[in-house]
Amino acid sequence: MNATKRLLAAMAGGAVLVGSVWGFSLLGPRWPDGTVVMHLQLGSSGGRLIDGSASWGDSAEAALALWNAEMRDLKFRVVRDSTVPVRQGDDVNNVFFAQNVYGTSFGGAIAITTLWRTGNRRTEADVVFNTRLDWNSYRGPLRNSTSGDTLFDLRRVALHEFGHVLGLDHPDEFGQNVRAVMNSSVSNLDALQDDDISGVQFLYGRGRGGVLVEVTRPSTSTFTTNRSRFVIRGRATGGRVQAILAANNRLGSRLYRARGSARWRVTVPLRSGVNRITLRVRTDSGRLQKAAVVRIRRQ
């Protein structure tokens, strides 16, 4: 490891949160726009898996495709059954099973993503799955293996780890209470959630079928005012902006149109104390996606 390149986190989730008005959590440096090549080296699954995947590589590649569909400025590219050496610090992104992470114990983790950086540029991310656990690939609620232990779904775990590769952290470890594949514990969720999509689009732009909403005022996730009403401003691409106000456990909502790169504004009444405002976007197909969370404290 030279003086300019360093390991950002031995386990994804251990780096610094980057603050924003969005509801997700970030790990730090991002990849330059373009392509990130993932070398799949997961070996044979010994036959077809529960969801019909022909191999571990098939299952992992499906997870990469789900992230690709949501991004504009970055795309994963796959090298199937890659034969490159498995080692760290070489700017090659290895995805493989192992009993440890380059000699370090998993410590109870299901999988670990290592993140390397040079300055503010991400340069490498290896994803290591714990071979001591029971694995398959399937949809729906978590299952048990014949031994009675959890039968881990490689695709949903890979979906989570590839989110770390992209630069997303665990929102539930930073005060967030959201439905997200990126939460720290594996769950019955087996698909990307609104919070996951908002996070990756914040980093790499809106892919096909996505919606990007930008908040321009306030410029921070928390804001203090002595006014009884506050105007939130922003820009949106496609769909309709829906502001849902949750103030001291009382809910209200109002729809606002936003077309193209339209500028939008939402005037919200404020009660004393903390007012939590969630901004949503509804696409033409009817999909509702959370875009941002702002907390305004009225003195």
Image: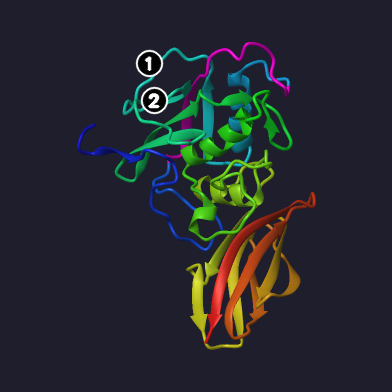
Q: How many marks?
A: 2
| In the displayed structure image, the side of residue 158 where residue 253 appears, left or right | right
Q: How is the image coloured?
A: rainbow
Up the image or down, 15 lies above or below 266; here it is above
Q: Is residue 237 visible?
A: no
Determine the main secondary structure of the stretch shown in magenta: loop
Q: Secondary structure at mark 2?
A: loop
Circles 1 and 2: CB distance less than 8 Å?
A: yes
**Closer to the camera, 2 or 256?**
2
**In the shown orientation, is residue 7 left or right of residue 254?**
left
The three-letter code of the residue at mark 1 reads: Pro
- Magenta span has 48? yes
Name the kind of residue labelled 2 in the image.
Answer: Val
Q: Tell me the residue at 37%/38% (across/down).
A: 10
150, 61: nearer the viewer: 150
Residue annotated with mark 2: 92
Q: Residues within 10 Å of mark 1 (few under 14, many from 20)?
A: few
Q: Foreground mark, 1 or 2? A: 1
Q: Is residue 239 above or below residue 38?
A: below
Residue 259, horizontal then vertical, whole percent = 70, 59
Q: CA–CA distance between discs 1 and 2?
A: 9 Å
Q: Is residue 16 magenta?
A: no
Image position, residue 7 (x, y; %): 32, 38
* Residue 50, placed above or below residue 214: above
Task: Report the span colored magenta.
Answer: 31-51
Please name the residue that numbered disc 1 is placed on. 85
The residue that appears at 49% across and 57% down in the rendered structure is: 174
Rendering quarter of residue 116: top left
Residue 268 in view here: yes
Q: Nearer the viewer, residue 214 or 161?
A: 161
For residue 145, above or below residue 258:
above
Q: Residues within 10 Å of mark 2 (few under 14, many from 20)?
A: some
